Image: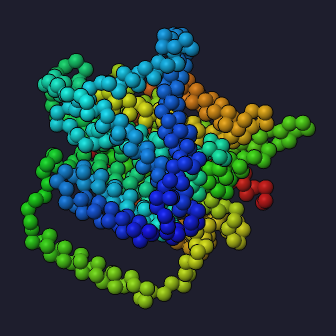
Amino acid sequence: MADPISDPIGFSLEIMTSPLFFKVAVFPGLTSIGIIIALFIWLDRKITARVQLRVGPLYASPLGGVLQSFADLIKFAFKELFIPRNADKFFFVAAPVLALIGGAGLVGLIPFTPEWQISNLELGLPAFLAFVTLSPMLILLAGWSANSKYPFIGGLRSLFQQTAYEIPLWLSAIGVVMMAGTMNLIGIVQAQAKPWYVFPGMYIPGWYIIPQALGALLFFITATAEMERIPFDLPEAEPEIIMGWQAEYPGFLFMSAAGASFVRLYAFSALFSVLYLGGWMGPAPVPALLWTAIKIIIVSSLIILLRATFPRVRIDQLLRAGWTYLLGLAFLNIVITYLLVVGPRI
Amino acid sequence: MPDIAFFGFAAVTVLGAILALESRDLVYGAVSLGVSFLGVASLFFLLDAAYIGVFQIAVYIGAVVILILFTVMLVGPAKGEGPTEFRRTALFIGILVAMMLGVGGALASPSAFSTNQPCTPECDLAQFSQSLLVTYSVQLAVLSLVFAAAVIGALTLAKSERGTA
Amino acid sequence: MVAPGLAEIFYYLGFIVVATLVPIIALFLIVTPRDAKPSPMKLETYEAGQMPSGRGRTRFIIQYYPYLLIFVIYDVVAMFLFAWALTLRTLQPPGSGTWPILIFMGVLLVPLAYSIHLASQRDLW
């Protein structure tokens, strides 16, 4: 067990003035999460609008409406919070807030560069996936607590959808662990540093998206399902069950619920770029943090593009696809990765 | 300091379990069971078994509590009704469980068992998987049969539900 | 993994505690200055334009519950597969973990094949 902390007050003063405090409070911690959520909401609305031949948010600032989501956040903060009668007050308020905190916890595990990370857990990847398994429970509680039909249906659909797609998510991440030999996220990025093939003059980077193409595709699909984005947004189906489990939530709680969804978009895009796209690595003149930002924006834009173009998947199609085809493909990915890792030595 | 941490987590575990049994609303009971499992996971982290702690969170809180919550929400009694009458059989079962726990606690003392593979400080995940895959590989294969049987049983339940619906 | 690993977990827990306090304080700041004016209409649930009727917590999609059972089991399977995946290259007699884990996954493919077979008979799934 760890050594006892001998001087609590000095210890906490030391923490507050340390770079760790900056990391927790500003970047990649809480303030940056808030700002990045707002920017992602704007990105989502802008890309969706452009694909649908509209303009999207335009008036809130000279830069194409970037400040629109900040204006929305301020508006939501001032709305009245009313709770439906016979609702379960504790879980009604607690569930979206806990979902937001869970999303922030996901972001805290991800290394943006080797210096900018809140904590480098030895078991970073299973810890991230374990946090992901907590979210179906919170959404089920949120849907149940409103004591209303549509949120409850949305909560149940979300439960089945997220539990169905979590196992292929776990199994597709196993391929990365097999190739890297570690579950530490910084270790996984560093294991992708070896170039895959060296041409005279340039090289193809050894990012895992090339050997793990099937795994990356599976991860992408299951992560989109975990985030309940279209084409998997059945729990939140707008014309059918009126925003599903979020239907009864006023003002600040709605902002927490939507914010939780966008934090998970941020966290999953960041994890995808760490696991498959080589994290912060890239050719020299561009700083490492900028490479991370570019990769996260590319992955999130792809996920947002899916939203703008695809129709919705039905619940029985969704569950059947998750439990049969995606699970089988995940096992196939494990076998292929095994041959890639062990094969050269046979 | 570590002792404070241990007592704190143990208190969370026990309180969560007591609340899970005693609360009137079964949903609150299921959630406090989840909190109790969180206490167990923290105890695993204190024992340097971080891998098991992480999977305790993922499997117990992420799957078992969800199953219990789902069952309670859909087939449980309405809010506010719970078993309140005191039955003599409950008292008898409680005494029996206490006796079993006492015997089990006496057996679990270090003098009762002698392990042939003591856990040194290098006893970490690599050694766990080494022993799982090499030393106990036959047991692993048998375990897979148990898992497969459970999944086939669940699928059969799904099939018969739809068949009679 | 005695002291350093525990310190990392400690920092992470500190981050979670701070992340928990911020929305709670924000919620408190929003709720406190307001004098609430509840009206009967505000307390009703939303049912797309009609007055809500019937029980709030109706019983739906109960027939998909075996999926939750399967989820529990495959979650434990994932734990064993992660342990194998981590030490794939460092097992002591090299290549010795292969057959056990192949048998493990092979036996688990049988229920997968059964579920694909069930999926092809559409009215049973």
Q: Report if residue A164 is visible in the image.
A: no
Q: Measured along the vertical axis of the image, is residue C52 above or below residue B162? A: above
How many labels, in total? 0
Decide which of B158, A187 is in the foreground and name it: A187
Judge left or right: residue A222 versus residue A216.
left
Quarter of the picture containing the C terminus of chain B is: top left
Question: Which quadrant of the structure image shows residue A93?
Answer: top left
Judge left or right: residue A48 versus residue A294.
left
Q: Position of residue B81 (x, y in %)?
A: 12, 51
Q: Report if residue A256 is visible in the image.
A: yes
Q: Measured along the vertical axis of the image, is residue A101 above or below residue B125? A: above
Question: Which quadrant of the structure image shows residue B33?
Answer: bottom left
Decide which of A56, C95 is in the foreground and name it: A56
Picture residue at 39% right of the left edge, 82% below the top: B108
Quarter of the picture containing the N terminus of chain B is: bottom left
Residue ranking furthest to the right? A200
Q: Measured along the vertical axis of the image, is residue A4 above or below residue A316? A: below
Decide which of B89, C61 is in the foreground and name it: B89
Q: Where is residue A20 in the image (x, y as percent from the top left)?
A: 56, 48
Q: Position of residue A230 (x, y in %)?
A: 47, 28
Q: Position of residue C63 (x, y in %)?
A: 31, 43
Picture residue at 48% right of the left edge, 27% below the top: A38
Q: Measured along the vertical axis of the image, is residue A273 above or below residue B153? A: above
Judge left or right: residue C125 versus residue A46.
left
